Amino acid sequence: MTKEKLALEIIERLKKEYPDAGCTLDYNQAWKLLVSVRLAAQCTDARVNVVVQDLYARFPDVNALAKAPVEEIEKIVKPCGLGASKARDISACMKILRDEYDGKVPDDFDALLKLPGVGRKSANLIMGDVFGKPAIVTDTHCIRLVNRMGLVDGIKEPKKVEMALWKLIPPEEGSDFCHRLVYHGREVCTARTKPYCDKCCLKDICGKCGVEQGA
């Protein structure tokens, strides 16, 4: 099976397994996803979803957060880890949104990359989830799973994985595919324990499962 055909088969099976998969960060406005995705670095989405409730209760919009003392932001987001750097980035980012984009998040990938604390993973997440545009979010689950499945061969660098997947994944499927990889990576193809290959919907076509079954 070619990698292109493998990718399409994986997409279809994951659709059936996780039909309602979506972003696990809670948000109802684009700027809030921008904040949450910065806080999610080296932190669980579940914890971020709790912490931002206090942040938005204190600073309910872009202007309020842009005006907020960095120290006040840091006090609230500290439970997410790396509080000082995350607070600085959030403050700087909100100031740019206020001053250059009329408080709105730009729908341009390159413009997003210029915002403090926003890398390719974050920019792709926002492009896909907020603006419904083609996106490939190469988080740790994505990188681990596509290597195990055989869609990429020993590639660990996020940008290289992203570029490889753009050649295999139909543009309109990319964002949802990556969300489903997160669900599958947490529930079945785990990182901290041995993967539960016996209950995997991909076990007959996955590179890792196939090797183990033939062993």
Image (cartoon, rainbow, N blue to C red):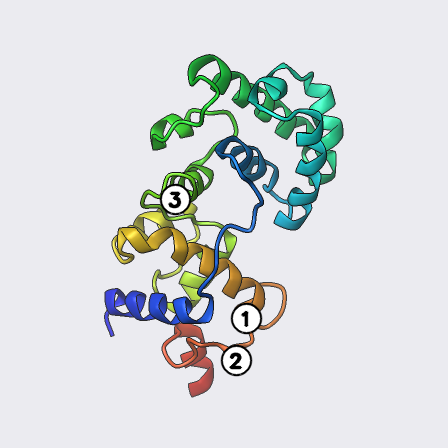
In which quadrant of the rendered view does residue 169 lie? bottom left
Q: Residue furthest bottom?
A: 214
According to the image, label 3 marks what residue?
128
**How far across and how far down the image is residue 204, in percent?**
39, 81
**How far across and how far down the image is residue 108, in percent?**
34, 30
Q: Circles 2 and 1: CB distance less than 8 Å?
A: yes
In which quadrant of the rendered view does residue 43 lie? top right
Give the label, 2 or 3, closer to the camera.
3
Question: Which is more N-terminal, label 1 or label 2?
Answer: 1
Q: Residue at x 31, y 65 (%)?
A: 7
124 vs 141, left or right, is left
Q: Can residue 173 be seen by looking at this rendering?
A: yes
Q: Nearer the viewer, residue 20 or 37?
A: 20
Question: Which is more N-terminal, label 1 or label 3?
Answer: 3
**How far across and how far down the image is residue 189, in percent?**
52, 68
According to the image, label 1 marks what residue?
188
Q: Relative to 11, say whether 196 is above or below.
A: below
According to the image, label 2 marks what residue?
199
Figure quadrant of the N terminus: bottom left
90 vs 4, left or right, is right
Mark-to-mark CA distance, 3 and 1: 24 Å
Question: Which is more N-terminal, label 3 or label 2?
Answer: 3
